[in-house]
Image (cartoon, helix red, strand yellow):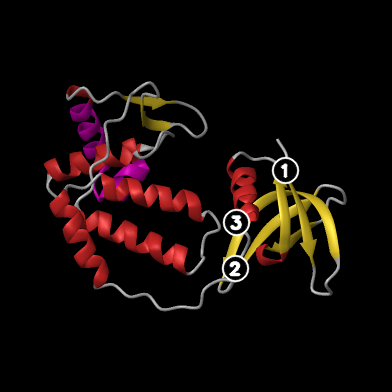
Amino acid sequence: MQRTERLFALAEYLRGRRTGVTAEVLAERFGVTVRTIYRDLDTLRAASLPVGAERGRGGGYALDRSYSLPPVNFTAREAALIVALGRFAIDMRLLPFTGTLESALDKVRSALSTSAQRELLERLRELTFLGVPSLPTRKPVREALERAWFERQPLRITYVDGNYLETVREVRIESVVMDRHETRLDAVDLASGERRHFRLDRITRAEALG
């Protein structure tokens, strides 16, 4: 990687992260020495990019939090891959957050020029994904899950287990697990303190508890 190319990539790497990154991590990421990273960071500062150093645990180099990022520009190649993978995730129901993902993909497409959008469509027609879709889930359930997970709120669910027994539980989501044709919530039952998995397709109702 040439120096100019590396400086641009380094700036993009930092602008994609608002938490600190150590010089050692940056050196390993770009395959150069730590001393070279220090010189590159000085060059970016000289070009008016507000790179600061944060001390302490979780610190490192980062852009100033008050820095307003310019619009992101995608090449047709970058956009084609992002949109293709996004469409695959939606079609295969890999992610429960389909509404937000659809909105994000629309923004990626709208960022392209007319000619780039035309090229994007041509590239997408040449990509084919095969797989077994995850089990279907109800849209209101997915929306409640998305809100609870992103906003770190408890979730009240109506759940039907393998014996067709329906229960109402309040849970705290620890993670979302996507395993072949199943999407599961790894969650803690707030009443019992028990940690267990809940299949998303067996949740008939859900409500995020603000």
Numbered mark located on residue 154 in the image: 1
In the displayed structure image, the side of residue 47 where residue 21 appears, left or right: right
Q: Earlier in the sequence, mark 3 or mark 1?
A: 3
- In the rendered view, tell whether residue 129 sits above or below residue 44: below
Front one among 51 and 117: 117
Q: Position of residue 65 (x, y in %)?
A: 40, 24
* Residue plotted at (65% across, 54% down): 141
Q: Position of residue 126 (x, y in %)?
A: 24, 73
User: Where does the magenta region start and end?
Assistant: 24-44
**Tag 2 residue:** 136
Report the predominant secondary structure element of the magenta stretch: helix
| Marks 3 and 2 in Cβ contact (< 8 Å) | no
Q: Amino acid at mark 3?
A: Lys
Looking at the rendered structure, the secondary structure element under dot 3 is helix
Q: Amino acid at mark 2?
A: Pro
Question: Of discs 1 and 2, which sits in the foreground?
Answer: 2
In which quadrant of the rendered view does residue 39 lie?
Answer: top left
> Gap in Å between the C-alphas at discs 1 and 2?
23 Å
Q: Earlier in the sequence, mark 1 or mark 2?
A: 2
Asked if the stretch drawn in magenta spans residue 36, the answer is: yes
**Tag 3 residue:** 139
Q: Position of residue 144 (x, y in %)?
A: 64, 48
